[in-house]
């Protein structure tokens, strides 16, 4: 079976993107190559607590955010939202019930969508939904 090992995204400035992911999501720099990447403009490899590596690679011209979504598990969605908001990070959606569960959505410096979730909120949301379902009051989540 194949295992997803790393994901790469194109960014306007690899250093600024590296710093954003480190400061806001707590990723750690695995390595960086100032003249790396296909265009030799620079790339950094970042890791969180999983084995998945995120490569932020500076690309020439305009950056077109991909239609993919990066979902990060955090300890507490509400606390993470409050902390990042206090730092000035703008959210697309504050913590709330969404079609994929309970969490928040924001965008990185280049417009790539990031979702934040925590295990406790997801589990509590699933239990509430199951309870409503058993009582005949559940409506399909959005």
Image: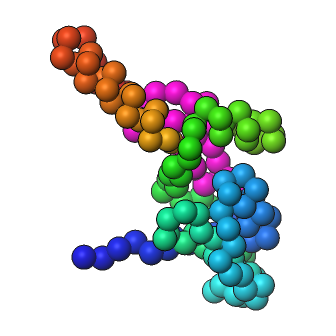
Going by the image, does 132 lie left or right of 63?
left
Q: Is residue 136 above or below residue 72?
A: above
The image quarter containing residue 89 is: top right
Quarter of the figure that contains the N terminus? bottom left
Q: Nearer the viewer, residue 121 or 43?
A: 121
Q: Is residue 131 visible?
A: yes
Horizontal and vertical percent position of residue 37: 66, 84
Q: Is residue 59 visible?
A: no
Coloured how?
rainbow
Give, as a single range, the part of the protein colored magenta. 92-116
Tell me what residue is drawn at x 80 percent, y 36 percent. 86
Please name the predominant secondary structure of the magenta segment in the image. strand
Horizontal and vertical percent position of residue 106: 63, 43
Going by the image, does 16 lie left or right of 28?
right
Tell me what residue is drawn at x 60 percent, y 54 percent. 112
Horizontal and vertical percent position of residue 117: 51, 42
Horizontal and vertical percent position of residue 51: 49, 71
Is 117 contained in the magenta span? no
Is 114 contained in the magenta span? yes
Tell me what residue is drawn at x 65 percent, y 40 percent. 80
Quarter of the figure that contains the C terminus? top left
Tell me what residue is drawn at x 81 percent, y 40 percent. 88
Instruction: Give the number of marks.
Output: 0
Q: Is residue 16 above or below residue 80?
A: below
């Amino acid at each position: 079976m194949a295992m997803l090992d790393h994901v790469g995204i194109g960014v306007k400035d690899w250093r600024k993107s590296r710093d954003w992911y480190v400061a806001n999501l707590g990723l750690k720099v695995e390595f960086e190559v100032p003249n790396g990447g296909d265009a030799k403009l620079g790339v950094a490899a970042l890791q969180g607590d999983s084995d998945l590596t995120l490569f932020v690679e500076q690309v020439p011209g305009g950056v077109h955010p991909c239609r993919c979504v990066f979902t990060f598990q955090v300890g507490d969605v509400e606390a993470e939202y409050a902390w990042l908001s206090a730092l000035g990070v703008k959210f697309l959606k504050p913590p709330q019930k969404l079609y994929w569960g309970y969490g928040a959505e924001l965008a990185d410096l280049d417009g790539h969508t990031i979702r934040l979730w925590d295990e406790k909120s997801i589990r509590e949301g699933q239990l509430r939904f199951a309870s409503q379902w058993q009582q005949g009051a559940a409506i399909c989540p959005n």
